[in-house]
Image (cartoon, rainbow, N blue to C red):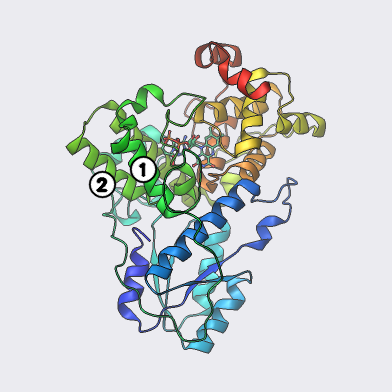
């Protein structure tokens, strides 16, 4: 419950508090590309996160109500039954999410809404440009931001919460995590904060991030914070503040800067999504370039299964299938190979990543895929990697390939 300004605000203005989580069941039916939006790895991570939240709430004598209904029907019913005056939520600027939020606000016009942007580093109104003028490429935007815009100060978790109305039942979830770090992805805010402690002060791995971040194998070469960040279990503002703190008390160097730089990429893609909306998902992207619409089912299936015959790509896809995670370097190679060597339409690849990734994030996934395909924010037009040269550089002893293809 770290850095949740809308919860703090809500808690200060109401007498009774109902905490509701909507389980998005429609994400489990296959989409136009043949995959449900949420695969097994992410489902499990979210379930663990809910357990963790329930345990934290229980310590504050509160509980989460889990609903598998649609917010459009359940929220008005709850409002009527409990005479609700205020609603708080965190805002995500996806196309569907925005449409749904606007519809809810319109339907529940008598409610006071408290909406925060826990997902972002900056308040959009503090940017030195209007949304429509946000640059379409990263570097010019970053140069206008750095030194000019402050990261929003994260809020502390609430020490007390108002009680819920009587007769509203908690979803029965056991406390399965103690918040310790297991060098693997375990859902929940406490595990996310433990990984932050681990990567920062405990191991001081952060001090070497810039040199190690292109690694393929192991836990320590990058922060591994993405799954918690993507699920809203960790605030990017908290990470940015912890980087600042580390720079004051441990060391300030190129590596500490570079982790912040990567958070800026995350922020940039969120702004691209907000600016371009559905064009981020269009075949030709927001550059409206002529897309390659080629799609061959057997080639696609082979790529998904890690059976293309290209060793490093197959290793990556098998790691993705087994764990839900891929390093940034392996994502670039698997995606570039799919688009530029297998010559397939990029959105099929992006949809498979959406299904499989434990850290799936709508703006970062589709923004990075579009960048590689040439319809997005790459100033050079499109990005094709030399797979052979990359293999020799990043997996010189073939340890990664051997591990996943054995
Ligand atoms: C084709 C493709 C698809 C991707 N899909 C996703 C996705 O769905 N979700 C996701 O979080 N990241 C995505 N990324 C970005 C990046 O690969 C992952 O964020 C990173 O590998 C996660 O590992 P980490 O937390 O150890 O990252 P670190 O290297 O430790 O970086 C720290 C944080 O910075 C952010 N970040 C780093 N690189 C990027 C980037 N290129 N774009 C946006 N944010 C970045 C992430 O939040 C990450 O957790 C994608 C990249 C590519 C090339």
Q: Is residue 17 above or below residue 290?
A: below
Would residue 132 be seen by someone viewing this image from the given angle?
A: no
Percent coordinates x, y for residue 203 in the rendering: 33, 32
Instruction: Please identify the quarter of the rendering in which residue 69 is found.
Output: bottom right
Left or right for 23, reference 62 = right
Residue drawn 29% across the image and 32% down it? 257
Badge 1 element: helix
Residue drawn 62% across the image and 44% down it? 354
Viewer-nearest residue: 286 or 205: 205
Percent coordinates x, y for residue 94 in the rendering: 53, 55
- For the N terminus, the quadrant is bottom left
- The residue beneath circle 1 is 196
Find the distance from the CA under tag 1 to the CA under tag 2. 24 Å
Q: Reading the chain from its start, which is encountered first: label 1 or label 2? A: 2
- The residue beneath circle 2 is 149
> Which mark lies nearer to you, 1 or 2?
1
Left or right for 24, reference 299 = left
Percent coordinates x, y for residue 400 in the rendering: 57, 20
Q: Is residue 64 above or below residue 288?
A: below
Label 2 beta carbon within 8 A of ligand 1: no
Please say if the residues under marks 1 and 2 sit with CB atoms less than 8 Å apart: no
Q: Is residue 44 above or below residue 399?
A: below
């Amino acid at each position: 419950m770290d850095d949740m300004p809308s919860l703090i605000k809500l808690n200060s203005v109401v007498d009774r508090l109902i905490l509701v989580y909507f389980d998005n069941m429609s994400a489990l039916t296959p989409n136009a590309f043949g995959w449900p939006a949420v695969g097994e790895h992410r489902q499990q991570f979210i379930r663990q996160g809910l357990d963790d939240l329930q345990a934290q709430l229980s310590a504050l004598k509160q509980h989460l109500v889990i609903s598998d209904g649609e917010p459009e029907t359940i929220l008005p019913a709850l409002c009527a039954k409990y005479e609700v005056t205020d609603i708080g939520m965190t805002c995500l600027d996806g196309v569907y999410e925005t449409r749904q939020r606007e519809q809810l606000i319109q339907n529940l016009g008598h409610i006071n809404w408290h909406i925060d942007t826990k997902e972002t580093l900056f308040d959009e109104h503090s940017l030195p440009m209007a949304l429509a003028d946000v640059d379409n490429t990263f570097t010019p935007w970053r140069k206008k931001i750095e030194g000019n815009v402050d990261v929003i100060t994260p809020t502390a978790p609430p020490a007390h919460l108002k009680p819920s109305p009587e007769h509203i039942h908690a979803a029965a979830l056991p406390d399965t995590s103690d918040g310790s770090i297991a060098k693997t992805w375990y859902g929940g805010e406490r595990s996310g904060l433990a990984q932050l402690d681990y990567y920062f002060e405990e191991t001081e791995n952060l001090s070497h991030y810039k040199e190690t971040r292109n690694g393929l194998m192991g836990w320590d070469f990058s922060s591994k914070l993405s799954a918690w960040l993507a699920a809203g279990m960790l605030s990017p503002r908290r990470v940015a503040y912890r980087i600042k703190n580390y720079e004051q008390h441990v060391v300030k160097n190129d590596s500490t800067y570079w982790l912040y730089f990567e958070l800026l990429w995350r922020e940039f893609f969120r702004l691209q999504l907000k600016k371009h909306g559905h064009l981020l998902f269009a075949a030709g992207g927001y550059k409206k370039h002529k897309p390659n619409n080629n799609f061959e089912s057997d080639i696609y299936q082979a790529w998904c299964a890690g059976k293309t015959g290209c060793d490093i790509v197959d290793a990556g896809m098998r790691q993705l299938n087994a764990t839900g995670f891929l390093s940034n370097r392996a994502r670039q190679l698997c995606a570039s190979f799919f688009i530029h060597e297998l010559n397939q339409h990029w959105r099929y690849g992006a949809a498979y990543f959406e299904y499989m990734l434990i850290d799936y994030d709508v703006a970062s996934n589709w923004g990075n895929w579009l960048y590689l395909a040439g319809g997005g924010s790459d100033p050079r037009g499109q990005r094709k990697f030399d797979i052979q040269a990359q293999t020799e550089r990043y997996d010189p002893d073939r340890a990664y390939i051997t591990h996943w293809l054995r």
